[in-house]
Image: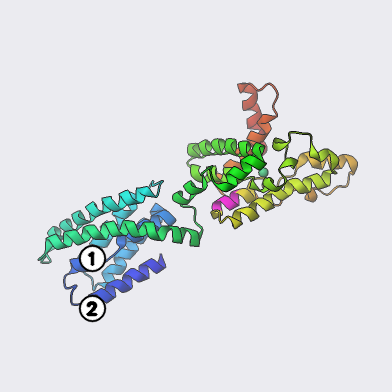
Amino acid sequence: MVVLFCIIYLAVLAVMRLEAFDTPLKIALLMPAAMAAMLVTVLLNQQTAILFVVMLSLGILCASNFMLAPTLFAFFSGIAGVSVIRNMRKRFDLVKSACILALINPLIIIVISVALPDPVNDLSFLIAMASVNGFMGGILVIGFLPILETALNTSTSFRLMEFSDLNSPIMKKMLLTASGTYNHSIMVATLAESACREIGADPLVARVGAYYHDIGKMEQSEYFVENQVDGNKHLALNPRLSATVIRSHVKQGVEKAIQMRLPRQVVDIIAEHHGNSVISYFYNEAKKLDETVDPENFTYPGNPPRSKESAVVMLADVVEAACRTLEKPSVPRLEKFITELVNKK
Ligand SMILES: [Fe+2]
Ligand SMILES: [Fe+2]
Protein backbone atom coordinates (compact mmCIF):
# COMPACT_ATOMS: atom_id res chain seq x y z
CA MET A 1 0.00 0.00 0.00
CA VAL A 2 2.86 2.36 0.83
CA VAL A 3 4.50 1.60 -2.52
CA LEU A 4 1.26 2.21 -4.43
CA PHE A 5 0.64 5.41 -2.48
CA CYS A 6 4.15 6.75 -3.16
CA ILE A 7 4.01 5.92 -6.89
CA ILE A 8 0.71 7.75 -7.34
CA TYR A 9 1.78 10.69 -5.11
CA LEU A 10 5.02 11.18 -7.05
CA ALA A 11 3.19 10.76 -10.36
CA VAL A 12 0.84 13.62 -9.44
CA LEU A 13 3.81 15.81 -8.47
CA ALA A 14 5.53 15.03 -11.79
CA VAL A 15 2.42 15.55 -13.92
CA MET A 16 1.77 18.92 -12.26
CA ARG A 17 4.97 20.24 -13.84
CA LEU A 18 4.01 19.25 -17.38
CA GLU A 19 2.47 21.82 -19.71
CA ALA A 20 0.20 19.29 -21.37
CA PHE A 21 -1.71 18.69 -18.18
CA ASP A 22 -3.04 22.18 -17.74
CA THR A 23 -6.49 21.31 -16.40
CA PRO A 24 -7.15 19.48 -13.13
CA LEU A 25 -9.33 16.84 -14.81
CA LYS A 26 -6.50 15.81 -17.14
CA ILE A 27 -4.32 15.16 -14.10
CA ALA A 28 -7.10 13.01 -12.71
CA LEU A 29 -7.08 10.78 -15.77
CA LEU A 30 -3.53 9.65 -15.19
CA MET A 31 -4.24 8.38 -11.69
CA PRO A 32 -4.58 4.57 -11.57
CA ALA A 33 -6.74 4.91 -8.45
CA ALA A 34 -9.14 2.14 -9.43
CA MET A 35 -6.27 -0.24 -10.15
CA ALA A 36 -4.62 0.46 -6.80
CA ALA A 37 -7.93 0.03 -4.98
CA MET A 38 -8.64 -3.26 -6.73
CA LEU A 39 -5.21 -4.66 -5.90
CA VAL A 40 -5.61 -3.80 -2.22
CA THR A 41 -9.12 -5.32 -2.20
CA VAL A 42 -7.99 -8.63 -3.65
CA LEU A 43 -4.70 -8.92 -1.76
CA LEU A 44 -5.99 -7.66 1.62
CA ASN A 45 -9.69 -6.93 2.07
CA GLN A 46 -12.46 -4.52 1.29
CA GLN A 47 -12.35 -2.44 4.51
CA THR A 48 -8.61 -1.84 4.17
CA ALA A 49 -9.09 -0.92 0.52
CA ILE A 50 -11.72 1.72 1.36
CA LEU A 51 -9.40 3.20 3.99
CA PHE A 52 -6.60 3.14 1.44
CA VAL A 53 -8.74 5.01 -1.13
CA VAL A 54 -9.48 7.73 1.46
CA MET A 55 -5.77 8.11 2.30
CA LEU A 56 -4.84 8.07 -1.39
CA SER A 57 -7.38 10.82 -2.18
CA LEU A 58 -6.01 12.96 0.64
CA GLY A 59 -2.49 12.37 -0.66
CA ILE A 60 -3.55 13.44 -4.16
CA LEU A 61 -5.25 16.52 -2.67
CA CYS A 62 -1.92 17.60 -1.12
CA ALA A 63 0.22 16.66 -4.13
CA SER A 64 -2.03 18.55 -6.55
CA ASN A 65 -2.00 21.83 -4.59
CA PHE A 66 -5.50 21.21 -3.26
CA MET A 67 -7.27 20.69 -6.57
CA LEU A 68 -10.65 19.09 -6.05
CA ALA A 69 -11.15 17.43 -9.45
CA PRO A 70 -8.30 14.85 -9.28
CA THR A 71 -9.07 14.17 -5.62
CA LEU A 72 -12.74 13.47 -6.26
CA PHE A 73 -11.94 11.36 -9.32
CA ALA A 74 -9.43 9.26 -7.39
CA PHE A 75 -11.91 8.81 -4.55
CA PHE A 76 -14.95 7.79 -6.62
CA SER A 77 -12.97 5.77 -9.12
CA GLY A 78 -11.23 3.97 -6.24
CA ILE A 79 -14.52 3.19 -4.50
CA ALA A 80 -15.90 1.94 -7.84
CA GLY A 81 -12.85 -0.31 -8.15
CA VAL A 82 -13.41 -1.74 -4.66
CA SER A 83 -17.08 -2.44 -5.28
CA VAL A 84 -16.77 -4.04 -8.73
CA ILE A 85 -14.09 -6.46 -7.62
CA ARG A 86 -15.50 -7.83 -4.38
CA ASN A 87 -16.87 -11.39 -4.48
CA MET A 88 -14.86 -12.20 -7.60
CA ARG A 89 -14.05 -15.87 -7.94
CA LYS A 90 -12.52 -16.40 -11.37
CA ARG A 91 -9.77 -14.47 -13.12
CA PHE A 92 -12.12 -13.85 -16.01
CA ASP A 93 -14.28 -11.81 -13.62
CA LEU A 94 -11.42 -9.27 -13.63
CA VAL A 95 -11.97 -8.67 -17.34
CA LYS A 96 -15.62 -8.02 -16.57
CA SER A 97 -14.69 -5.53 -13.86
CA ALA A 98 -12.31 -3.77 -16.28
CA CYS A 99 -15.23 -3.35 -18.70
CA ILE A 100 -17.53 -2.06 -15.93
CA LEU A 101 -14.89 0.47 -14.87
CA ALA A 102 -14.57 1.60 -18.50
CA LEU A 103 -18.22 2.64 -18.21
CA ILE A 104 -18.19 4.02 -14.64
CA ASN A 105 -15.09 6.24 -14.98
CA PRO A 106 -16.56 8.44 -17.78
CA LEU A 107 -19.69 8.94 -15.63
CA ILE A 108 -17.52 10.14 -12.75
CA ILE A 109 -15.75 12.59 -15.10
CA ILE A 110 -19.10 13.94 -16.38
CA VAL A 111 -20.44 14.42 -12.84
CA ILE A 112 -17.25 16.15 -11.67
CA SER A 113 -17.11 18.45 -14.72
CA VAL A 114 -20.73 19.47 -14.16
CA ALA A 115 -20.42 19.85 -10.39
CA LEU A 116 -17.16 21.82 -10.27
CA PRO A 117 -16.84 25.36 -11.64
CA ASP A 118 -13.48 24.64 -13.44
CA PRO A 119 -13.74 25.29 -17.20
CA VAL A 120 -13.79 22.14 -19.38
CA ASN A 121 -12.89 22.56 -23.07
CA ASP A 122 -12.69 19.05 -24.51
CA LEU A 123 -15.12 16.91 -22.56
CA SER A 124 -15.35 14.17 -25.19
CA PHE A 125 -11.57 13.61 -25.01
CA LEU A 126 -11.74 13.46 -21.21
CA ILE A 127 -14.58 10.94 -21.34
CA ALA A 128 -12.68 8.70 -23.73
CA MET A 129 -9.54 8.89 -21.60
CA ALA A 130 -11.49 8.12 -18.42
CA SER A 131 -12.85 5.01 -20.09
CA VAL A 132 -9.34 3.94 -21.10
CA ASN A 133 -8.16 4.62 -17.53
CA GLY A 134 -10.81 2.29 -16.11
CA PHE A 135 -10.26 -0.48 -18.62
CA MET A 136 -6.47 -0.35 -18.37
CA GLY A 137 -6.71 -0.36 -14.57
CA GLY A 138 -8.60 -3.65 -14.65
CA ILE A 139 -6.27 -5.18 -17.22
CA LEU A 140 -3.15 -4.15 -15.26
CA VAL A 141 -4.62 -5.82 -12.15
CA ILE A 142 -4.76 -9.08 -14.13
CA GLY A 143 -1.09 -8.64 -14.99
CA PHE A 144 0.17 -7.59 -11.56
CA LEU A 145 -1.95 -9.89 -9.42
CA PRO A 146 -0.22 -13.24 -10.09
CA ILE A 147 3.18 -11.62 -9.41
CA LEU A 148 2.04 -9.90 -6.22
CA GLU A 149 0.07 -12.81 -4.79
CA THR A 150 3.01 -15.17 -5.28
CA ALA A 151 5.51 -12.64 -3.91
CA LEU A 152 3.36 -11.91 -0.85
CA ASN A 153 2.12 -15.54 -0.63
CA THR A 154 -1.40 -14.36 0.11
CA SER A 155 -4.49 -16.48 -0.25
CA THR A 156 -6.56 -14.52 -2.75
CA SER A 157 -9.73 -16.25 -3.85
CA PHE A 158 -8.25 -16.68 -7.34
CA ARG A 159 -5.20 -18.48 -6.03
CA LEU A 160 -7.27 -20.63 -3.67
CA MET A 161 -9.56 -21.60 -6.54
CA GLU A 162 -6.50 -22.79 -8.45
CA PHE A 163 -5.31 -24.85 -5.48
CA SER A 164 -8.79 -26.32 -5.04
CA ASP A 165 -8.50 -28.05 -8.41
CA LEU A 166 -8.66 -31.79 -7.75
CA ASN A 167 -6.93 -32.46 -11.07
CA SER A 168 -3.66 -30.97 -9.81
CA PRO A 169 -0.70 -33.40 -9.95
CA ILE A 170 -0.41 -33.60 -6.15
CA MET A 171 -4.09 -34.52 -5.66
CA LYS A 172 -3.89 -37.10 -8.45
CA LYS A 173 -0.81 -38.57 -6.82
CA MET A 174 -2.67 -38.72 -3.51
CA LEU A 175 -5.55 -40.55 -5.16
CA LEU A 176 -3.11 -43.17 -6.47
CA THR A 177 -0.78 -43.58 -3.49
CA ALA A 178 -3.16 -42.91 -0.59
CA SER A 179 -6.71 -43.31 -1.84
CA GLY A 180 -8.11 -43.63 1.69
CA THR A 181 -6.54 -40.33 2.70
CA TYR A 182 -7.81 -38.79 -0.54
CA ASN A 183 -11.41 -39.78 0.19
CA HIS A 184 -11.04 -38.70 3.80
CA SER A 185 -9.72 -35.28 2.70
CA ILE A 186 -12.59 -34.74 0.26
CA MET A 187 -15.11 -35.55 3.02
CA VAL A 188 -13.36 -33.28 5.51
CA ALA A 189 -13.39 -30.52 2.88
CA THR A 190 -17.13 -30.88 2.32
CA LEU A 191 -17.83 -30.79 6.07
CA ALA A 192 -15.46 -27.90 6.79
CA GLU A 193 -16.69 -25.86 3.85
CA SER A 194 -20.34 -25.99 4.87
CA ALA A 195 -19.50 -25.41 8.54
CA CYS A 196 -17.49 -22.30 7.65
CA ARG A 197 -20.35 -21.01 5.54
CA GLU A 198 -22.64 -21.37 8.57
CA ILE A 199 -20.39 -19.44 10.95
CA GLY A 200 -19.24 -16.73 8.55
CA ALA A 201 -15.65 -17.99 8.17
CA ASP A 202 -14.02 -18.35 4.74
CA PRO A 203 -15.35 -21.59 3.17
CA LEU A 204 -12.75 -21.59 0.39
CA VAL A 205 -9.78 -21.41 2.78
CA ALA A 206 -11.27 -24.28 4.78
CA ARG A 207 -11.88 -26.37 1.66
CA VAL A 208 -8.35 -25.95 0.32
CA GLY A 209 -6.91 -26.46 3.82
CA ALA A 210 -8.86 -29.70 4.15
CA TYR A 211 -7.76 -30.99 0.73
CA TYR A 212 -4.13 -30.61 1.75
CA HIS A 213 -4.27 -31.20 5.51
CA ASP A 214 -2.94 -34.76 5.30
CA ILE A 215 -0.54 -34.46 2.33
CA GLY A 216 2.21 -35.46 4.75
CA LYS A 217 0.77 -38.99 4.80
CA MET A 218 1.57 -39.67 1.17
CA GLU A 219 5.11 -40.99 1.63
CA GLN A 220 4.12 -43.59 4.25
CA SER A 221 0.46 -43.94 3.43
CA GLU A 222 0.21 -47.61 4.44
CA TYR A 223 0.79 -46.70 8.11
CA PHE A 224 -2.50 -44.79 8.29
CA VAL A 225 -5.66 -46.71 9.03
CA GLU A 226 -7.72 -45.29 6.15
CA ASN A 227 -5.23 -46.72 3.61
CA GLN A 228 -4.73 -50.13 5.17
CA VAL A 229 -6.10 -52.84 2.92
CA ASP A 230 -3.86 -55.77 3.72
CA GLY A 231 -3.34 -55.80 7.46
CA ASN A 232 -2.20 -53.37 10.12
CA LYS A 233 1.47 -52.45 9.69
CA HIS A 234 1.67 -51.24 13.28
CA LEU A 235 1.35 -54.78 14.63
CA ALA A 236 5.00 -55.27 13.75
CA LEU A 237 6.14 -52.01 15.39
CA ASN A 238 6.46 -50.94 18.98
CA PRO A 239 3.99 -48.19 20.01
CA ARG A 240 6.68 -45.54 20.31
CA LEU A 241 7.81 -46.08 16.71
CA SER A 242 4.21 -46.16 15.49
CA ALA A 243 3.55 -42.81 17.17
CA THR A 244 6.68 -41.36 15.55
CA VAL A 245 5.45 -42.37 12.08
CA ILE A 246 1.95 -40.97 12.75
CA ARG A 247 3.29 -37.71 14.22
CA SER A 248 5.64 -37.11 11.31
CA HIS A 249 2.79 -36.55 8.83
CA VAL A 250 2.20 -33.06 10.22
CA LYS A 251 5.79 -31.95 9.81
CA GLN A 252 6.13 -33.58 6.38
CA GLY A 253 2.86 -31.98 5.29
CA VAL A 254 4.08 -28.53 6.30
CA GLU A 255 7.38 -29.06 4.47
CA LYS A 256 5.58 -30.20 1.32
CA ALA A 257 3.16 -27.27 1.51
CA ILE A 258 5.98 -24.75 1.82
CA GLN A 259 7.74 -26.40 -1.09
CA MET A 260 4.56 -26.10 -3.18
CA ARG A 261 4.22 -22.46 -2.06
CA LEU A 262 0.72 -23.02 -0.71
CA PRO A 263 -0.77 -19.87 0.88
CA ARG A 264 0.20 -19.21 4.51
CA GLN A 265 -3.32 -19.86 5.83
CA VAL A 266 -3.31 -23.32 4.26
CA VAL A 267 0.14 -24.13 5.70
CA ASP A 268 -1.17 -23.08 9.13
CA ILE A 269 -4.15 -25.41 8.77
CA ILE A 270 -1.80 -28.33 8.01
CA ALA A 271 0.44 -27.46 10.96
CA GLU A 272 -2.46 -27.05 13.39
CA HIS A 273 -4.93 -29.75 12.35
CA HIS A 274 -3.97 -32.06 15.23
CA GLY A 275 -3.03 -29.22 17.59
CA ASN A 276 -0.82 -30.50 20.39
CA SER A 277 -3.01 -33.50 21.15
CA VAL A 278 -1.71 -36.87 22.33
CA ILE A 279 -1.99 -39.92 20.05
CA SER A 280 -3.97 -41.68 22.74
CA TYR A 281 -4.19 -45.16 21.21
CA PHE A 282 -0.42 -45.68 20.99
CA TYR A 283 0.17 -43.82 24.26
CA ASN A 284 -2.14 -46.25 26.06
CA GLU A 285 -0.52 -49.22 24.30
CA ALA A 286 2.93 -47.99 25.38
CA LYS A 287 1.68 -47.47 28.92
CA LYS A 288 0.66 -51.12 29.09
CA LEU A 289 4.30 -52.04 28.42
CA ASP A 290 5.92 -49.34 30.55
CA GLU A 291 4.09 -47.18 33.13
CA THR A 292 6.71 -44.41 33.11
CA VAL A 293 6.42 -43.63 29.40
CA ASP A 294 6.74 -39.94 28.48
CA PRO A 295 3.53 -38.51 26.87
CA GLU A 296 5.77 -35.96 25.08
CA ASN A 297 6.83 -38.72 22.68
CA PHE A 298 3.21 -39.31 21.74
CA THR A 299 2.21 -35.68 21.28
CA TYR A 300 1.71 -33.98 17.92
CA PRO A 301 4.29 -31.24 17.33
CA GLY A 302 1.80 -28.47 16.43
CA ASN A 303 -0.04 -25.60 18.10
CA PRO A 304 -3.81 -25.41 18.61
CA PRO A 305 -5.65 -23.68 15.72
CA ARG A 306 -5.42 -19.89 15.60
CA SER A 307 -8.02 -19.19 12.90
CA LYS A 308 -11.69 -20.12 12.63
CA GLU A 309 -11.02 -22.07 9.42
CA SER A 310 -8.21 -24.04 11.04
CA ALA A 311 -10.38 -24.93 14.03
CA VAL A 312 -13.21 -26.05 11.75
CA VAL A 313 -10.87 -28.29 9.74
CA MET A 314 -9.59 -29.82 12.99
CA LEU A 315 -13.15 -30.62 14.11
CA ALA A 316 -14.19 -31.92 10.68
CA ASP A 317 -11.08 -34.12 10.64
CA VAL A 318 -11.81 -35.86 13.96
CA VAL A 319 -15.50 -36.17 13.19
CA GLU A 320 -14.88 -37.72 9.77
CA ALA A 321 -12.24 -40.13 10.99
CA ALA A 322 -14.15 -41.22 14.10
CA CYS A 323 -17.57 -41.58 12.48
CA ARG A 324 -16.17 -44.11 10.02
CA THR A 325 -15.56 -46.49 12.91
CA LEU A 326 -19.00 -46.08 14.48
CA GLU A 327 -20.95 -49.31 14.33
CA LYS A 328 -24.61 -49.23 13.28
CA PRO A 329 -24.73 -45.45 12.81
CA SER A 330 -28.11 -43.76 13.24
CA VAL A 331 -28.89 -40.04 13.33
CA PRO A 332 -29.32 -39.78 17.14
CA ARG A 333 -26.21 -41.92 17.77
CA LEU A 334 -24.16 -39.84 15.33
CA GLU A 335 -25.38 -36.57 16.83
CA LYS A 336 -24.46 -37.69 20.34
CA PHE A 337 -21.09 -39.02 19.20
CA ILE A 338 -20.21 -35.85 17.24
CA THR A 339 -21.20 -33.57 20.13
CA GLU A 340 -18.89 -35.58 22.41
CA LEU A 341 -16.01 -35.36 19.92
CA VAL A 342 -16.44 -31.61 19.43
CA ASN A 343 -16.70 -30.91 23.16
CA LYS A 344 -13.60 -32.98 23.81
CA LYS A 345 -11.61 -30.94 21.28
FE1 LIG B 1 -3.81 -35.60 10.01
FE1 LIG C 1 -7.06 -36.03 8.52
Local SS, label 1: helix
Q: Is residue 218 left or right of residue 129?
A: right
Contact between labelled residues 2 and 1, with CB atoms less than 8 Å apart: no
- Residue 202 in view in this figure: no
Q: Is residue 274 left or right of residue 1?
A: right
Between 264 and 148, the one lying in front of the other is 148
State the image quarter where residue 319 is shown. top right
Q: Is residue 342 above or below residue 37?
A: above
Q: In terms of secondary structure, what is the magenta stretch mainly?
A: helix
Q: Is residue 33 magenta?
A: no
The numbered disc on residue 17 is 2
Amino acid beneath label 2: Arg
Is label 2 within 8 A of ligand 1 (CB to nearest ligand atom)? Answer: no
- Tell me the magenta residue range: 265-269
Q: Position of residue 267 (x, y in %)?
A: 59, 52
The numbered disc on residue 28 is 1
Q: Is residue 184 left or right of residue 64?
A: right
